[in-house]
């Protein structure tokens, strides 16, 4: 016999702490769908209102075939929230979305709007660069890499290589207010974003990875279970002294898997299930480098005495910037075969001259930098001029990274060498 003396509480299963909204259970009536976890989807549905308490269906309702479709009795048991708390939607059409930017017109007018915006792309880019340069105390190079990072998107997966992954670590952040200031501005540009202070308490107590609950037969959400394209800004400067527990270590590993391979090992208790994701991650650290390896890293180098421009965006300019980030990210980028061959030959020559100058992973990051640099200018391929700029930006970035300490000499070193 059920205890009805106290109301039952149900977890609404939002992935992000403090998230608010109206959850729904969507029923799709088809044998096969192309829906995947974390897809962004537009549903066209019939709303099934919750049944009135203590009511008996009429004869006509019992004979209505639609009542069978809208019958929710099978999922309102102890394991699922009632329809009064989580309404049911019965889907008869859905559309997977590449973005959720409401400023962009529908497909019939999108091409015309894109052509119009691309005519202003250089001016918009300069405005974004000025905003980031002001926030970064005059560091133009760091502003460049931040802009490129915000265009990151997974385009393909070839074996273990994730094409388009561009996690970024901005190091040497001595101003602990900078991560929050940067996120405030980024959140105005991006469709979806989340700020996470990497305190010991957050790492040790929050759930980053979704976990299957077999007693309720539900997948309990974790922070990393978000829609594709959600930009994460991680504040490592907030990390204080102390020890990470087992949960904290697992959370750090989960972040590392996302930053390096864009995958998450969902916890199904007896075994992990690897899920692909697309979460661009920006991590700001107080040291020169983060405790988590990223695809690209650059130490911050503020300009002494830099005076910000104090120029603020109008609402019209802000809307153009928002449209800019959505549109250029989705441009069809293509690297001609002859250009790719020339780059590969250049890589081989660089390796011949100095085997330690660049490795395959670094060259892949360089190509990704070139892709996003071209897209940031609204170009669909990488020109010779932009390839030169790509190499210059990367060379300047590398000059900021402290060299690795030399390995200690072994005990077998000759006495003469020791002297």
Image (cartoon, helix red, strand yellow):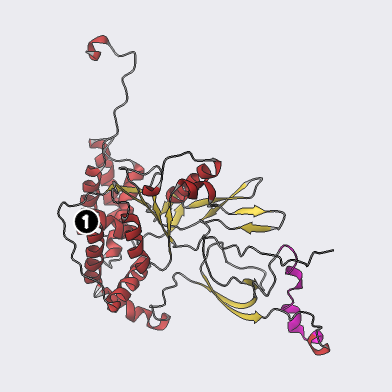
Where is residue 386? Give x, y as percent: 22, 58
Q: Residue drawn at (25%, 41%), measured in percent from left and top?
A: 350
Is residue 252 magenta-colored? no
Which image quadrant for residue 337?
Answer: bottom left
Query: In the picture, which quadrant includes the C terminus?
Result: top left
Is residue 63 magenta-colored? yes
Q: Is residue 320 above or below residue 195?
A: below
Q: Which residue is mark 1?
A: 137
> Residue furthest toward the top?
415
Q: Tell me the SS state at disc 1.
A: loop
Query: In the picture, which quadrant includes the N terminus?
Result: bottom right
> Residue furthest toward the bottom?
60
Choose between 159 and 276: the one closer to the eye: 276
Where is residue 20? Give x, y as percent: 53, 68
Circle 1 residues within 10 Å: few <14, some 14–19, many ≥20: many
Horizontal arrangement in the rendering, residue 266 relative to residue 29 (left or right): left
Where is residue 116? Give x, y as percent: 28, 79
Q: Is residue 332 visible?
A: no
Where is residue 406? Give x, y as percent: 29, 28
Q: Residue drawn at (31%, 19%), measured in percent from left and top?
A: 409
Q: Is residue 159 above or below residue 182?
A: above
**Residue extent of the magenta highlight:** 62-79
Q: Is residue 214 visible?
A: yes
> Residue furthest toward the left?
305
Which image quadrant for residue 323?
Answer: bottom left
Figure label count? 1
Q: Residue drawn at (72%, 62%), measured in percent from left and top?
A: 79
Which image quadrant for residue 287?
Answer: top left
């Amino acid at each position: 016999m059920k205890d009805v003396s106290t109301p039952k509480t149900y977890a609404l299963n939002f992935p992000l702490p403090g998230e608010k909204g109206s959850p729904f259970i969507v029923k799709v009536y088809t044998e096969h769908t192309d829906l995947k976890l974390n897809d962004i989807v537009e549903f066209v549905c019939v709303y099934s209102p919750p049944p009135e308490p203590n009511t008996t269906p009429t004869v006509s309702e019992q004979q209505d075939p639609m009542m069978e479709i809208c019958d929710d009795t099978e999922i309102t048991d102890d394991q699922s929230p009632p329809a009064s708390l989580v309404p049911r939607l019965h889907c008869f059409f859905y559309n997977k979305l590449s973005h959720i930017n409401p400023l962009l017109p529908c497909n019939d007018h999108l091409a015309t709007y894109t052509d119009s915006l691309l005519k202003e792309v250089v001016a918009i880019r300069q405005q974004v660069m000025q905003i980031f340069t002001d926030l970064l105390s005059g560091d133009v190079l760091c502003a460049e890499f931040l802009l490129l990072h915000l265009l990151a998107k997974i385009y393909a997966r070839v074996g273990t290589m994730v094409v388009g992954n561009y996690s970024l670590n901005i190091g040497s952040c001595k101003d602990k207010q900078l991560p929050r200031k940067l996120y405030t501005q980024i959140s105005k540009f991006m469709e979806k974003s989340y700020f996470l202070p990497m305190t010991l308490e957050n790492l040790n107590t929050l759930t980053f990875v979704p976990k299957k609950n077999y007693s309720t037969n539900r997948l309990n959400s974790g922070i990393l279970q978000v829609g594709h394209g959600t930009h994460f800004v991680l504040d490592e400067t907030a990390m204080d002294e102390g020890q990470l527990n087992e949960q904290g270590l697992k959370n750090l590993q989960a972040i590392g898997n996302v930053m390096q391979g864009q995958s998450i090992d969902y916890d199904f208790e007896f075994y992990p299930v690897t899920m692909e994701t697309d979460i661009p991650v920006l991590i700001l650290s107080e040291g020169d480098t983060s405790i988590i390896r990223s695809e690209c890293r650059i130490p911050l180098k503020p300009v002494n005495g830099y005076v910000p421009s104090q120029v603020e965006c109008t609402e019209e300019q802000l809307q153009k910037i928002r449209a800019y980030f959505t549109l250029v990210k989705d441009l069809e980028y293509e690297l001609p075969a002859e250009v790719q061959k020339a780059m590969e030959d250049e890589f081989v020559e660089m390796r011949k001259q100095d085997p330690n100058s660049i490795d395959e992973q670094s060259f892949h990051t360089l190509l990704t930098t070139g892709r996003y640099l071209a897209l940031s200018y609204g170009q669909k391929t990488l020109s010779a001029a932009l390839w030169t700029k790509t190499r210059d930006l990367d060379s300047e970035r590398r000059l900021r990274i402290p060299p690795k300490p030399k390995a200690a000499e072994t005990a077998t070193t000759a006495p003469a060498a020791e002297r």
